[in-house]
């Protein structure tokens, strides 16, 4: 391996995905060793690894912020609790209406939606207002065929700013040809308990 | 200009007693050692300590002429990184002793961390597909393994890796990365 001079361009740059795998410690030992030998001689790839580390740290902070609307696994909710975060969860069965709120010191908000998805190849999660108008559709959400629930983390930032309102979540099986079948409908009557300005739209 | 010299030339000058070549070696190697430390020690402070320790050992070796092949500076530094991290893991006490002895000798100045627009990153993550977003969140929340994400998604670890790579590619494009 040659020794490029500082600031010289890299003739054999390492792929960004491989650099991220290195940071995540998922490369095989031999590949990790080869990468380290290269980075120890190549400032260009070192700079790009630094970018990957910044991206990983940014994504970690964002993921832990609770501000993303995302389908998550049970483990993530457990980990959040173990980290000392305050998790507010609401569990709902199909057809059920839930009274809910968030407080200023909540960190994570999650909805557990009981559902049978055994015959569904693709499932969408639709968020509607009380008139049934869809405001957001989470298309082809990741679920296991043998699961009995979907856990959706709602943005805690958005929920804290939300006025008293009603949201309806619909889990929809989308079949070939686009035919849709509602697997479950869950109503959340949110009561605002945090003072703040009214007026906003659902995301 | 010292910065134009090859590693081998810098090594030879250190062996010849040129102190400015030592400074150049430190300037050149410190960011690389720090990256190794960040990856293996998961702490900026520990990585900075590693930089100090490895540079000290390297300077001692070069002054003493123990690096016979001057073209092998980078492998020597990497080997020293590996041995030092192993030592650190074996004995936290020994680490503290080393730092007590050498801590103030070399104060590394890490390169500025790349700036990341957090708001833009949030928008980019929110624009990912649901599967990609879930994998990204599960991967980076507290660095869960692909196995954990795979178990949640009912996919193979290989598939999770492919989804993660695809998501990262989209995110880097969205963030304006060029390479």
Image (spheres, grey):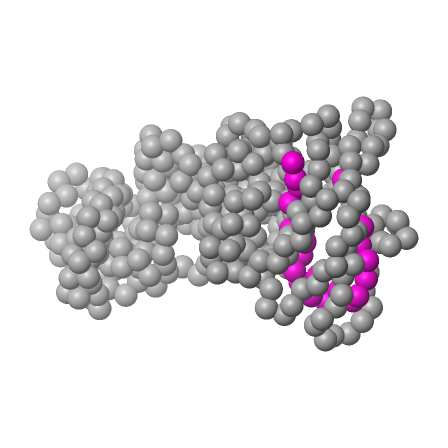
| Viewer-proximal residue among B28 and A106 | A106
Counting from the top left corner in percent of width and height, residue A122 is at: 73, 30
Counting from the top left corner in percent of width and height, residue B104 is at: 22, 68
Residue A161 is covered by the magenta coloring: yes
Q: Specify whether A185 is left or right of A113.
A: right
Residue A23 is covered by the magenta coloring: no
Q: Specify whether A71 is left or right of B116.
A: right
- Quarter where residue B93 is shown: bottom left
Can residue A34 be spotted in the picture?
Answer: no
- Quarter where residue A156 is shown: bottom right
Name the outermost residue toward the right. A131
At x 37% / y 42%, what residue is drawn? A39
- Quarter where residue B105 is shown: bottom left
Counting from the top left corner in percent of width and height, residue A9 is at: 45, 43
Quadrant for the C terminus of chain B in the image: top right
| Viewer-proximal residue among B119 and A199 | A199
Q: Specify whether A4 is left or right of A184.
A: left
At x 15% / y 65%, what residue is drawn? B101
| Residue A171 position (above or below residue A57) | above
At x 49% / y 51%, what residue is drawn? A79
| Viewer-proximal residue among B20 and B129 | B129
The span picked out in magenta is A148-171
Counting from the top left corner in percent of width and height, residue B162 is at: 56, 31
């Amino acid at each position: 391996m040659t020794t490029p001079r500082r600031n010289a361009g890299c003739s054999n740059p390492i792929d960004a995905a491989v650099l991220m795998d290195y940071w995540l410690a998922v490369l095989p030992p031999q590949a990790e060793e080869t990468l380290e030998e290269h980075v120890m001689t190549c400032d260009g790839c070192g700079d790009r690894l630094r970018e990957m580390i910044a991206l990983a740290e940014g994504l970690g902070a964002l993921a832990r912020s609770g501000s993303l609307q995302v389908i998550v696994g049970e483990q993530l909710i457990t980990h959040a609790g173990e980290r000392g975060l305050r998790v507010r969860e609401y569990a709902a069965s199909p057809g059920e209406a839930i009274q809910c709120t968030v407080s200023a010191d909540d960190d994570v908000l999650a909805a557990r939606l009981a559902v049978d998805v055994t015959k569904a190849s693709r499932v969408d999660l639709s968020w509607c207002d009380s008139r049934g108008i869809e405001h957001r559709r989470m298309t082809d959400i990741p679920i296991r065929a043998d699961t009995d629930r979907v856990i959706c983390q709602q943005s805690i930032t958005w929920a804290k700013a939300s006025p008293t309102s009603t949201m309806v979540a619909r889990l929809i099986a989308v079949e070939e040809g686009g035919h849709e079948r509602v697997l479950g409908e869950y109503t959340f009557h949110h009561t605002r308990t945090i003072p703040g300005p009214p007026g906003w739209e659902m995301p | 200009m010292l910065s134009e010299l090859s590693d081998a030339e810098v090594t030879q000058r250190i062996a010849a007693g040129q102190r400015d070549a030592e400074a150049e070696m430190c300037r050149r190697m410190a960011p690389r050692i720090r990256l190794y430390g960040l990856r293996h020690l998961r702490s900026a402070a520990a990585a900075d300590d590693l930089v100090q320790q490895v540079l000290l050992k390297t300077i001692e070796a070069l002054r003493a002429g123990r690096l016979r092949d001057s073209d092998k500076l980078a492998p020597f530094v990497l080997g020293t990184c590996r041995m030092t991290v192993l030592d650190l893991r074996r004995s936290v006490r020994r680490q503290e002793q080393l730092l007590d002895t050498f801590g103030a000798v070399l104060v590394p100045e890490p390169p500025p961390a790349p700036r990341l627009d957090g708001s833009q990153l949030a928008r980019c993550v929110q624009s990912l597909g649901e599967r990609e977003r879930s994998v990204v969140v599960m991967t980076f929340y507290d660095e869960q393994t692909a196995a954990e994400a795979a178990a949640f998604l009912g996919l193979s670890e290989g598939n999770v890796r492919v989804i993660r790579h695809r998501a990262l590619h989209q995110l880097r494009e969205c963030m304006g990365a060029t390479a």
